[in-house]
Amino acid sequence: MLRRFIFVSGLIAATALGFAGRASAESVTVEFTSNVSGTCSIGNPAVTDDSEVFPGVLTYNDTTKSFSASTPVEIDVACDGGNLNVAVSQSAGTTNVATMEATVTPGSGTPIVATNTTPGFGFIPATTNKLSVAMNAAFALTDTPIADAYKFDVVLTATP
């Protein structure tokens, strides 16, 4: 009985192994691609180089030895939501100021602040159509500023 059991078990195992179908599988990848082109334009979209300048007016306070913007400059922006880099620098004037600060507010978004030591970086919400740019600068109180024409630049760079 034991022999018959071993024989039948062996036969079943041999049959299962000998006649088992062999699976052969191949796979392929179907790849779909597309691009989402974001665009950001600041100011007049007809001007395609960096020649566009928006003049702002600073008021000088002799007591505090500081400049401040009496009215922020409003700039048109068309951006599907993106990033905004802000840099501020002094480009003219005999005496260098000690501090500069530019504040850019994208619509009702969070203000982006840049100083002469730290550039600003922030987000432009997709619903924004205006940037409000203000700035101030100050000489050190120990400085004696020389009478001259002083100029400061706030550079805005938007990327989608």
Image (cartoon, rainbow, N blue to C red):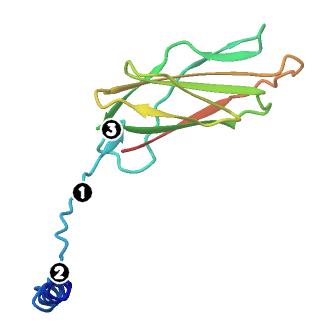
Q: Position of residue 30 (x, y in %)?
A: 16, 69
Residue located at (41% from left, 51% from top): 49
Height in image: 41 above or below 135? Answer: below
Q: Give left or right: position of 1 versus 94.
A: left
* Left/right of residue 69 with respect to residue 118 in the rendered view: left
**Callout 2 touching callout 1 (CB < 8 Å):** no
Q: Amino acid at mark 2?
A: Glu
Q: Nearer the viewer, mark 3 or mark 2?
A: 2
> Mark 1: few, some, or many residues within 10 Å (few <14, many ≥20)?
few
Gap in angstroms between the C-alphas marked 2 and 1: 30 Å
Q: Are marks 3 and 1 in contact (CB under 8 Å)?
A: no
Dot 3, how many residues are within 10 Å of its Cα: few (below 14), some (14-19), or many (20+)? Answer: few
Q: Which residue is mark 3?
A: 44
> Reading the chain from its start, which is encountered first: label 3 or label 2?
2
- Pick whichever, 39 or 138, lies toward us: 39
Residue beneath the point at 25% across and 51% down: 36
Residue type, mark 3 in image: Asn
**In terms of secondary structure, where does tag 2 sit?**
loop
Disc 3 secondary structure class = loop
Q: Circle 1 sits in a helix, a strand or a loop, which is it? A: loop
- Residue at the spot of label 2: 26
For the residues labelled 3 and 2, the Cα–Cα distance comes to 56 Å
